[in-house]
Image (cartoon, rainbow, N blue to C red):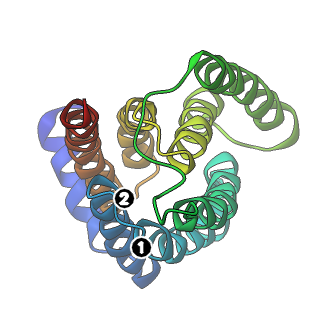
Amino acid sequence: MSIDQIWQQFINDFQYVRWQEWVSTVTQIASVWYARKNNILVYPTGIIGVLLAAWVYFFVASPPLYADGVLNIYYFCMSVYGWYNWSKMSNDHQQVYRISWCNRFELIAGLSGFMLSWLVIYFMLVYITNSNTPILDSLVSASAVTAMWWMAKRKIENWIAWIVSNIVAIPLNFYKGFMLFTLMYILFLVMAYAGYTSWKKTTLSVK
């Protein structure tokens, strides 16, 4: 496919963007922005965005992006869990979960969860659904599973997992014709890198 053909496909598909995609995109961008700022509003804004995205992936995509749809339901559950964690305060009114690097257990658990999720989601897509992008779909989902868990714990590595997920999600959404989501994931990639550098600086300043 030439550059001109890619651009033409982008323009054609962009004309048919649905309101659910618009609202989901705006709220998810706001969510990532708040995450970079270490602001708890990352979760309420994110919840709106992921529920609408799940609807689009399940009921608009053809064939449906099952893994991405289920992934957004997982996002919702982890957002509730993360919202609770980020709200917790110690007896001296300090945040229980502060920005930090993963310890050995958290790193191994996250990477193990990533590999297991990738395999499970991939085989589910191949044998249970009619997905025509099982490898990329499951890779996006698996890396995001780990990213959400690390984010709920305020671990810096969550941004690295998001970077991986976004890199894969960009061509996947373009291929499926979701032009607004494609642009969103390009922006997410930039913001994830900014979030990584910002959170890393926070730990250095504490030292």
Q: Residues within 10 Å of mark 2 (few under 14, many from 20)?
A: many
User: What residue is at 62 percent from the left and 20 percent from the top?
Assistant: 111
The residue to which callout 1 is attached is 21
Residue occupying the far front of the picture: 92
Left or right side of 180 for 194: left
Please tell me which of labels 2 and 1 falls first in the chain.
1
Three-letter amino acid code at the position of disc 1: Glu
In the rendered view, tell whether residue 17 sits above or below residue 38: below
Residue 154, x across and y down, in percent: 47, 45
Quick one: SS at disc 1? helix
User: What residue is at 65 percent from the left and 57 percent from the top?
Assistant: 78
User: What residue is at 48 percent from the left and 66 percent from the top?
Assistant: 93
In the rendered view, tell whether residue 135 sits above or below residue 37: above
Quadrant in which residue 170 is drawn: top left
Picture mark count: 2
Of residues 42 and 103, the one drawn nearer to the viewer in this rendering? 103
Residue 19, x across and y down, in percent: 40, 84
Residue 94, x across and y down, in percent: 45, 59
Residue 39, x across and y down, in percent: 35, 65
In the rendered view, tell whether residue 104 sits above or below residue 120: above
Of residues 162 and 25, the one drawn nearer to the viewer in this rendering? 162
Three-letter amino acid code at the position of disc 2: Phe
Whether residue 188 is visible:
yes
The residue to which callout 2 is attached is 181
User: What residue is at 68 percent from the left and 55 percent from the top?
Assistant: 74
Of residues 19 and 24, the one drawn nearer to the viewer in this rendering? 24
Quick one: SS at disc 2? helix
Residue occupying the far left of the picture: 4
Tag 2 near tag 1, CB within 8 Å: yes
